[in-house]
Image (cartoon, helix red, strand yellow):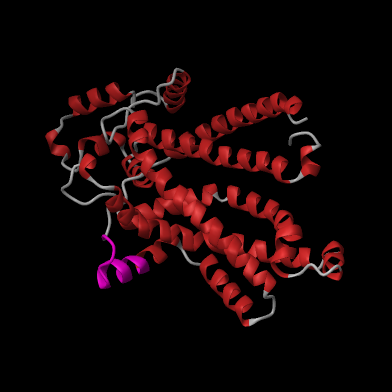
């Protein structure tokens, strides 16, 4: 039974998550400490003549910026352990509130893109593998190789110019129509604003999973048990559904869940191109504005997000492959 392995698995994963968050926090804070951006200046704005030295000192004292970097990190870590991620210097609001407001928008974007890229990638990989050596295979491979070296922001700009500027089918940007209250925005309008960012991330995310699925399918089709099944007269869709899908699903799932980090990185660029109000825009503003609490809060959330994705992949391994199910959790 799997149940007897659940507790050790949860304990190992919990310890790994804690160590990951500690390491990510320390490294991110160290990198931010070398930033040439002055947080006080970012907080005040471009016109520094409005604020005198005494006011600058008061602002630094209020935010704890006059303390040494190790002291600032220790104070921040102590607050995090108490459930307080601090206050954003840019938005003048609690970091948890800023992240909570933008997290749902980013999750909607990433979730739809993740599902669509997985479905398209696995489908294209299966088609290319089944049609190995044909013009369909070469066409799909060429498409994947081209996209693998294409940055997300460039794809986003092309889609923006073609579908929004030239054809006028979709809005130019933002998450909702301008000048309309959030509660008055319909689901259809939200989906219209999501279409191009989701399509951008999906197009870029298809290549890796499609190429890996194709190669795994070719390896499976060349195996002995597949030849034995073909000798018994099992061919086409029956062969694919009975003997191939399960064997190619493990690497496909592993690769797709491991792509959470890539999708998050692509979402940052896509949100900038389409001015989509998610965590990506907040990351850029926090980095350029020296907003350490907000940046570290988003880093922690993204680290947990990617870690959960990898953990779900491990769990699905046990469900899909009985050989792994009989062993211990990794």
Q: Quadrant of the N terminus?
A: top right
Q: Residue at x 31, y 41 (%)?
A: 289
Q: Quadrant of the C terminus?
A: top right
Residue 92 relative to residue 201: left or right:
left
The location of residue 22, given as percent across then percent down, is 55, 29
Work out whether 67 lies above or below 188. Answer: above
Residue 231 relative to residue 239: left or right:
right
User: Would you identify the image quadrant in which residue 38 lies?
Assistant: top left
User: Would you identify the image quadrant in which residue 104 lies?
Assistant: top left
Q: Main secondary structure of the magenta part?
A: helix
**Range covered by the magenta-colored residues:** 158-171
Work out whether 99 lies above or below 112. Answer: above
Work out whether 49 lies above or below 11. Answer: below
The front one of 277 and 5 is 5
Work out whether 285 lies above or below 20. Answer: below
The location of residue 222, given as percent across then percent down, is 81, 68
Residue 42 included in the magenta stretch of the image: no
User: Would you identify the image quadrant in which residue 100 lies?
Assistant: top left
Residue 168 included in the magenta stretch of the image: yes
The front one of 263 and 178 is 178
Q: Residue at x 42, y 20 (%)?
A: 79
Residue 255 relative to residue 276: left or right:
right
Q: Residue at x 42, y 51 (%)?
A: 267
Q: Residue furthest left?
A: 50
The front one of 288 and 213 is 213
The front one of 112 and 272 is 112
The location of residue 294, given as percent across then percent down, is 37, 34
């Amino acid at each position: 039974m799997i149940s007897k392995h659940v507790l050790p698995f949860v304990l190992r994963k919990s310890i790994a998550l804690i160590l990951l968050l500690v390491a990510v926090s320390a490294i991110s804070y160290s990198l931010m400490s070398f930033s040439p951006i002055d947080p006080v200046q970012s907080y005040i704005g471009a016109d520094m003549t409005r604020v005198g030295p005494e006011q600058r000192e008061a602002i630094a004292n209020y935010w704890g910026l006059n303390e040494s970097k190790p002291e600032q990190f220790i104070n921040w870590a102590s607050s995090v352990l108490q459930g307080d991620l601090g206050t954003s210097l840019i938005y003048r609001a609690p970091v948890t509130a800023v992240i909570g407001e933008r997290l749902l928008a980013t999750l909607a974007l990433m979730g739809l893109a993740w599902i669509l890229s997985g479905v398209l990638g696995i489908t294209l990989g299966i088609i290319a593998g089944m049609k190995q050596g044909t013009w369909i295979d070469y066409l799909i491979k060429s498409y994947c190789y081209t996209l693998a070296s294409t940055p997300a922001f460039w794809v986003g700009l092309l889609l923006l110019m073609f579908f929004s500027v030239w054809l006028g089918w979709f809005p130019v940007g933002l998450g909702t129509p301008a000048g309309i209250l959030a509660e008055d925005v319909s689901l259809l309008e939200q989906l219209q604003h999501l279409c191009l960012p989701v399509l951008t991330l999906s197009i870029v995310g298809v290549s890796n999973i499609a190429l890996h699925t194709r190669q795994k399918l070719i390896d499976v089709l060349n195996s002995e048990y597949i030849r034995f099944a073909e000798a018994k007269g099992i061919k086409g869709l029956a062969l694919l559904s009975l003997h191939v899908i399960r064997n190619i699903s493990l690497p496909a799932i592993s690769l797709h869940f491991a792509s959470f980090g890539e999708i998050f990185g692509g979402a940052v660029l896509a949100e900038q191109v389409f001015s989509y109000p998610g965590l990506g825009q907040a990351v850029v503003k926090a980095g350029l504005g020296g907003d350490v609490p907000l940046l570290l809060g988003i880093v922690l959330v993204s680290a947990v997000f990617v870690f959960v994705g990898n953990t779900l992949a491990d769990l699905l391994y046990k469900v899909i492959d009985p050989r792994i199910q009989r062993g211990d959790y990794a």
